[in-house]
Image (cartoon, rainbow, N blue to C red):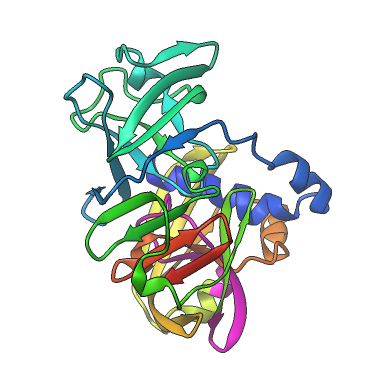
């Protein structure tokens, strides 16, 4: 799946369908299945790597017992599940695939993750590319656990026993609704709601056209990228420079670019507008920060 297509699907799911048919529809359709992961031990610091010059994808290295090969999962907090790609795992003996689910265990650093119910998506590279990207590490890894994502030093720490010292007195509330990370911040002096999605890695703020027009610099050069067809439409992203700050719990985060997607129907645009969410924050806006998430207490910190 291309980065743009994945991003657009996330927007459609969170920003658009959040309003479709009201709360009851959203609650029923997008409530994820019960968390099927068993997560054991603190991971220690796990160095991650980036794919693409614009750091389009954040990849976590995983290992299977008695296998020296390093495989990778895309880290995507926009996905409620950790999943494998069917074509990419078909030749891995440690993964047993049966009727759309997989049974296996693997290691992320020192953390052992196992389940007999991993979801399997019909996608991937049958030949397995040189980086051996075989799936997605989703927000279920974070649920009821403490996690540190250090973008400054390119590492992640999972299943922590306590908050790292720099964050102990600097925590604020957030929502982990439907395994989506949602928090408030001030933008141009007004309180807004944002979703943090590591799958929209190359973007700072992904929003609607009205907000985009309000934030972009006058006369700013616009970067345009078209996607493959989705829902019988061509979807296009428009990115422009801006010069704003998002203030999150008294910490100012520089916002240097803003993006919107064109190609939705008028109904979809209307639903996006009334969803109550200003937009999605990707990894790019936090590259000079560390983020601590305590999904057991719904507390987080940004350093």
Residue 208 appears anywhere in the view = no
Q: Is residue 198 magenta?
A: yes
Q: Residue at x 63, y 65 (%)?
A: 277
Horizontal and vertical percent for residue 48? 25, 48
Indicate left or right for 270 with 64 as reference. Answer: right
Indicate left or right for 15 with 115 as reference. Answer: right
Total marks in image: 0
Closer-to-camera residue (239/146): 146
Locate the N terminus and report the quarter of the image it occupies. Answer: top left
Note whether 39 is above or below 165 in the view shown: above
Horizontal and vertical percent for residue 291? 39, 65
Closer-to-camera residue (67/180): 67
Note whether 236 is above or below 289 in the view shown: above
Indicate left or right for 260 with 13 as reference. Answer: left
Note whether 119 is above or below 72 in the view shown: above
Furthest-bottom residue in view? 189
Horizontal and vertical percent for residue 131? 21, 33
Q: Quadrant of residue 194?
A: bottom right
Locate the C terminus and report the quarter of the image it occupies. Answer: bottom left
Q: Residue at x 76, y 46 (%)?
A: 27
Residue 188 appears anywhere in the view = yes
Note whether 129 is above or below 5 in the view shown: above
Q: Quadrant of residue 109?
A: top left
Horizontal and vertical percent for residue 296? 56, 55
Q: Which residues are magenta?
A: 186-211
Indicate left or right for 174 with 224 as reference. Answer: right
Q: Is residue 277 magenta?
A: no
Q: Residue at x 64, y 48 (%)?
A: 178
């Amino acid at each position: 799946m291309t980065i743009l297509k994945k991003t657009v699907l996330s927007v459609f799911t969170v920003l658009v369908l959040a309003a479709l048919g009201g709360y009851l529809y959203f609650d029923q359709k997008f409530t994820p299945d019960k968390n099927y992961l068993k997560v054991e031990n603190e991971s220690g610091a796990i160095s991650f790597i980036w794919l693409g010059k614009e750091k389009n994808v954040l990849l976590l290295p995983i290992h299977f017992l008695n296998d020296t090969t390093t495989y990778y999962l895309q880290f995507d907090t926009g996905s409620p599940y950790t999943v494998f790609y069917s074509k990419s795992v078909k030749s891995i003996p440690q993964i047993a695939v049966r009727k759309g689910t997989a049974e296996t265990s693997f290691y992320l650093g020192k953390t052992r993750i196992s389940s007999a119910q991993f979801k399997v998506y019909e996608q991937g590279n049958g030949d397995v590319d040189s980086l051996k990207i075989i799936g997605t590490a989703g927000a279920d890894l974070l649920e009821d656990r403490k996690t540190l994502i250090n973008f400054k030093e390119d590492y992640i720490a999972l299943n922590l026993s306590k908050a790292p010292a720099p964050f102990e007195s600097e925590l604020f509330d957030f929502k982990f609704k439907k395994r989506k990370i949602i928090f408030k911040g001030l933008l141009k002096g007004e309180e807004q709601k944002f979703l943090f999605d590591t799958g929209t890695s190359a973007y700072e703020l992904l929003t609607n056209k009205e907000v985009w027009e309000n934030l972009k610099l006058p006369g700013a050069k616009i970067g345009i990228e078209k996607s493959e067809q989705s829902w019988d439409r061509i979807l296009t992203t428009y990115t422009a420079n801006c010069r704003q700050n998002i203030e999150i719990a008294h910490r100012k985060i520089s916002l240097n670019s803003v993006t919107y997607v064109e190609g939705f129907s008028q109904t979809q645009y209307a639903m996006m507008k009334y969803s109550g969410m200003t937009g999605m924050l990707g990894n790019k806006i936090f590259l000079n920060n560390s983020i601590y998430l305590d999904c057991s207490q719904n507390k987080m910190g940004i350093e």
